[in-house]
Image: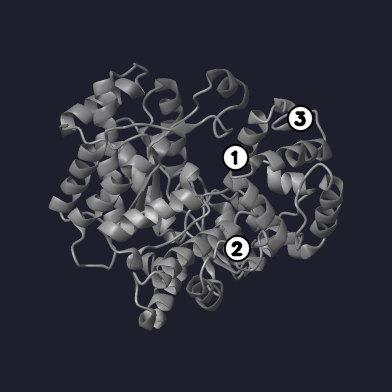
Amino acid sequence: MKPFLDKDFLLQTDAAKTLYHEHAAKMPIIDYHCHLIPQMVAEDHRFSSITELWLGGDHYKWRAMRTNGVDERYCTGKDTTDWEKFQKWAETVPYTMRNPLYHWTHLELKTAFGIEKLLSPKTAREIFDECNEKLKSPEYSARGLMRRYHVECVCTTDDPVDDLRYHKQTAESGFEIRMLPAWRPDKAMAVEVPANFRAYIDKLSEVSGVKISHFQDMIDALQKRHDFFAQMGSRLADHGIEEFYAEDYTDAEINAIFDKVYGGKVLTQEEIRKFKSAMLVIFAEMDYEAGWAQQFHYGAIRDNNSKMFKLLGPDTGFDSIGEFNTAKAMSKFLDRLNAEGKLTRTILYNLNPSANEVIATMLGNFQDGSYPGKIQFGSGWWFLDQKDGMEKQMNALSLLGLLSRFVGMLTDSRSFLSYPRHEYFRRTLCNLLGNDIENGLLPASEMDFIGQMVENISYYNAKNYFNF
């Protein structure tokens, strides 16, 4: 019987152990997509307790707690103490067995705090106190935790209207870990609610210094902000979309749609889809001209619980995997850019695992030999960033593309304790390859090449892909 979470956790063969300990484990972390709060890095935030660090904003944990019968006040409430919230999480943890939260929780306790006890109601107070005592040390600040996990670079997720003051402050402070902005212009194509869109465009006008009256004015303002992000070190864009949009449209139609929604009138579904289609193309062309990579996270149905959305707002644990027949639209979108010679390096992330083979085969349609792995199948995302989801993604990519050119893992997280997800991914990767070696599916004589492949997927492919 193997011990839980020992040094060979998830590693089932001698080959897997060699690949992980001699190759993957030593590689730095490039976290090219995350949701860290830049102000926390700039100001080297000190955490008041393990509850703030661990449970604040973590909707993964909130979902599990709700499912376990924990009242909302212990998840997001303002009238409960840090200890009470932590206690409720500790009560929930034993019930998360076989959920990735069980692995992540104990991996984070071990790697950050050196705690190897299992979290439960019996150990809760002891672990709470030990973590809080260690959090008093400077090495457990926001920057200290990044150093602890051997982070080399992070890319935050930033709106075009953000002033990026904290990125500038961090860079000027001499902090050795780079924090770069990533362009996330979702609100510029969110035309479903005219009043919200108008308010956003007015803000865009203010920060860009461009008077916006018509569609081209908006594009000029966005281009100005895109240029600013590039000056601040941005190398990539990201889009969070339900599905791909690739409707046919004319310039005259888009101009009229903008005038209509900017004027406060509700758009038809056809008009919404045409506007989004135009914006995706325009953003992609901006990225191509700047030499950036672009990322597309698609497939989520967000804010399903309208009652809780009204109470708590977005990103509070009420989203799910969606079903969208988006392959043709994705193909049409990529083909249009490719035909115009404006398809930049692109990463596609699906949230529904039924689309794994769709994505894996779509990549090959638009590889052009200009760059290894130019079109990428993004790592298992959100509900899929766990062992089973990552294995399915890597198996599909292996069978239908080139796993060896994969740019690897990211945290997609707001937490400074999420870096062990890179370790979790690397162990899973090494176990896949190690099992193949053990079973004669890959040659043991090529161990040096496979070891380099592991290092590339863990670090070098991303470093080269994003020109870091």
Q: Amino acid at mark 1?
A: Tyr
Marking on residue 164: none
Residue 436, image x, y percentages: 39, 68
Q: Percent from the top left, x then y, of residue 308?
A: 59, 22
Total numbered badges shown on the rendered structure: 3
- Judge whether 167 appears above or below 451 on screen: above
Mark 2, other Cα within 10 Å: few <14 / some 14–19 / many ≥20: some
Q: Secondary structure at mark 3?
A: loop
What type is the residue that disc 3 sits on?
Lys
Q: Nearer the viewer, residue 193 or 229?
A: 193
| Left or right of residue 122: residue 317 | left
Mark 3 and mark 1 in contact? Answer it, CB < 8 Å. Answer: no
**Badge 2 or badge 1: first in the primary sequence:** 2
Residue at position x 62%, y 46% from top? 101
- As rendered, which of 206 and 14 lies closer to the eye? 14
Q: Residue at x 44, y 53 (%)?
A: 390
Check disc 2 and give the amino acid type: Phe
Q: Which residue is mark 1?
A: 60
Q: Which residue is mark 3?
A: 78
Q: Residue at x 21, y 47 (%)?
A: 334
Residue 94: horizontal and vertical position, in percent?
71, 42
The residue to which callout 2 is attached is 9
In space, the residues marked 3 and 1 are separated at their CA atoms by 19 Å
Q: Nearer the viewer, residue 14 or 205?
A: 14
Mark with earlier residue (2, 3): 2
Towards the viewer: 174 or 310: 310
Say which of marks 2 and 3 sits in front: 2
Nearest to the eye among marks 2 and 1: give it. 2
Q: Residues within 10 Å of mark 3 (few under 14, many from 20)?
A: few
Q: Residue 292 in the image: x percent, y percent?
A: 34, 58
Q: How far is the residue under mark 2 from the one under mark 3?
A: 38 Å
